[in-house]
C-alpha cells in the first residue's frame, strides 16, 4: 500500500509541478528597492545563508517568493536531486525536511532553521527593516 501511495504523490508532483513553477513565476512580487550601498551590505550578509529546497515544494516556493520580495541573493541548493546537498542537509539538520535555511555566523557556528514560517520571519526580521 505504501509504494502505491508514494507512486500516486510522485505522479501528482510530476503533473502539477510545471504549473506550480509557472504560478511562482507569474505571481512573483516586486523586489524591495534599496540604495546601492544598502544592497551591497545585504548581499554581503546573504553570503552566509543557503536555502536547501525542492523545486516544486509549496513551502519552498513560499520562501523563494519572500526571498525575491526582499531582494536577497541567497544560494538555493537542490536537496532533492543533488545527493551532496541532500547529505549535507541530513548531516547538519538531522533530517531531509525542506525548506531549511543554513545560517553560518561570523564565528563559524552554523544554525539550521526549518519551517517556512520561521524562515520567513527570520528573513523579514533581519532584512525587511
Image: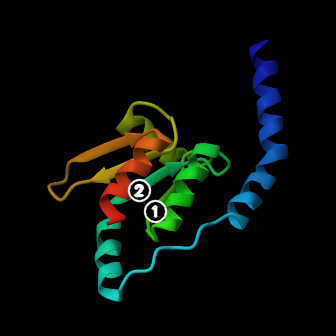
State the mark number for residue 75: 1
Would residue 31 be found to the left or right of residue 110 on screen? right
User: x%, y% of residue 15?
Assistant: 85, 45
Residue at image position (74%, 58%) is 23
State the mark number for residue 40: none
Q: Quadrant of residue 29?
A: bottom right
Q: Which residue is mark 2?
A: 50
- The quadrant in which the N terminus is found is top right
User: x%, y% of residue 77?
Assistant: 51, 55
Q: Quadrant of residue 10?
A: top right
Q: Secondary structure at mark 1?
A: strand
| Residue 80 shows up from this direction | no
Verify CB contact (< 8 Å) between mark 2 and mark 1.
yes
Would residue 63 be found to the left or right of residue 108 on screen? right
Seen from the viewer's position, the closer of residues 87 and 77 is 77
Name above or below for residue 90 compared with residue 67. Answer: above
- The quadrant in which the C terminus is found is bottom left
What coloring was used for the rendering? Answer: rainbow
Would residue 62 be found to the left or right of residue 121 on screen? right
Amino acid at each position: 500500500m505504501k509504494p502505491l501511495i508514494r507512486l500516486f504523490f510522485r505522479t501528482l508532483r510530476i503533473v502539477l509541478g510545471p504549473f506550480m513553477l509557472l504560478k511562482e513565476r507569474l505571481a512573483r512580487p516586486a523586489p524591495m528597492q534599496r540604495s546601492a550601498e544598502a544592497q551591497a551590505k545585504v548581499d554581503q550578509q546573504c553570503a552566509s545563508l543557503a536555502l536547501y529546497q525542492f523545486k516544486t515544494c509549496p513551502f519552498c516556493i513560499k520562501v523563494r517568493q519572500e526571498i525575491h520580495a526582499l531582494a536577497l541573493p541567497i544560494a538555493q541548493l537542490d536537496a532533492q536531486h543533488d545527493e551532496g546537498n541532500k547529505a549535507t542537509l541530513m548531516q547538519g539538520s538531522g533530517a531531509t525536511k525542506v525548506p531549511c535555511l543554513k545560517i553560518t555566523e561570523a564565528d563559524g557556528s552554523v544554525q539550521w532553521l526549518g519551517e517556512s514560517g520561521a524562515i520567513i520571519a527570520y528573513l523579514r526580521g533581519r532584512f525587511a527593516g
